[in-house]
Image (cartoon, helix red, strand yellow):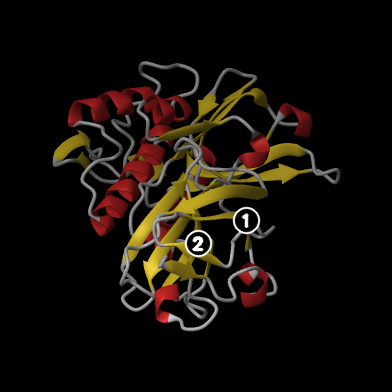
Amino acid sequence: MKRRLLLIGFLGWGASLCAAADFSISGLAGSYNNSTPLSFNITYTKPATTVEKRLVFFAELHNANTNALIDKKIFDNSNNGYTGTTQNFAVSLNTPPSGIEPVNVQLYAVPWSLNKKVVEHYKTYPTDGTFTYLWGGGGYGVTQNIYYKGSLIAPKPSGNTTYCSGLAFDCAITAFNEYNTANGHTSIGTMTVSQMNSFRLVWYGVTDAEKLAALAIPQYNVGLEITDFEEAQEGDFVQLWRTGGSGHNPLFISWIRNSSSEIIGMRYWGSQGSTNGSGIRNEYFTEGGGTVMKSRTYLGRFRKPRDNSDYTWAISSQGTASIPHANASTVTGWELY
């Protein structure tokens, strides 16, 4: 007697569970031998309202009674995330040994980036002149002592003074440290203290005079440079250069567009003289009458570690918990072979 896993009412569940489901599934047979992987196809369509531009997908098989994880597949595009509005994946999940049933499938679309935490954090800084702008003689330009793995990386200046690279670095490392503490991590990527000190030098433009944060992030394998302007999202870090020769290293908020939806400027948060320190400012590209050069504007984005926050941060999820699937050995009648 062959023992089979009977998948009752599974075909088309994506549409039946939710009329506007982001996930759909196809290619499932009616039943599977216990020793045969559970194979099917999933399609994910990203809602237009989704802020996160890069996604990672999980497909999981669970014990329906205990929720214990039986098998899991992660689709992360070589750890770079997926940017398309529609993604299709062929899934093969190992079926459970005999005696474990019923089971269900769970699917998740989760953020690739750390931007959710970065955005949450930058909004905690005061914009009332508490941390004023000082470039020359401003020390490290941070609002607090910045530590990594217990070592002081950037000491706070004696006064409450900041400048662009310092405030952006302050926001980035503090946000990542807070995230790590909440989720049980001890490192940003695989960086040692020595590497973090070198990372800061690149970020501040000491060892790189062009891309700064947008180079430091991919160089130390903690994220990517974002080269497609249409993919930019709030919480990216920007290095821009102006026609007069000056540069700036703030945090990206949004693009400014003209009536034809062309990008003519940006809204950013950072430390600058025009906001008396930390604050939000609009600045324009040469195409919009300003002095910022599009050709010398660079964006960097941090990668989020994979952990339990994937589930609480999930953009979309679908599952078959309401129609768990029984092992055919428990079924009598024609279904049993």
Residue 270: image location, x then y, percent: 48, 42
- Where residue 307 sits, quadrant-wise, is bottom left
Kind of residue at badge 1: Tyr
Residue positioned most to the left: 150
- Give the residue drawn at x 73%, y 27%: 286
- Where residue 188 sits, quadrant-wise, is top left
Asked whether the viewer can see residue 327, the reply is no
Q: Would you call the spot at circle 1 few (<14 residues within 10 Å), some (14-19), or many (20 or more)? A: many
Nearer to us in this view, 86 or 53: 86
Residue at image mark 1: 44
Residue 22: image location, x then y, percent: 63, 63
- Where residue 194 sits, quadrant-wise, is top left
Up the image or down, 94 lies above or below 222; here it is below
Report the number of numbered marks.
2
Mark 1 and mark 2: Cα distance apart in space: 10 Å
Nearer to us in this view, 261 or 190: 190
Residue at image mark 2: 107
Residue 134: image location, x then y, percent: 39, 34
Kind of residue at badge 2: Leu
Q: Badges 1 and 2: C-beta atoms under 8 Å apart?
A: yes
Disc assigned to residue 140: none
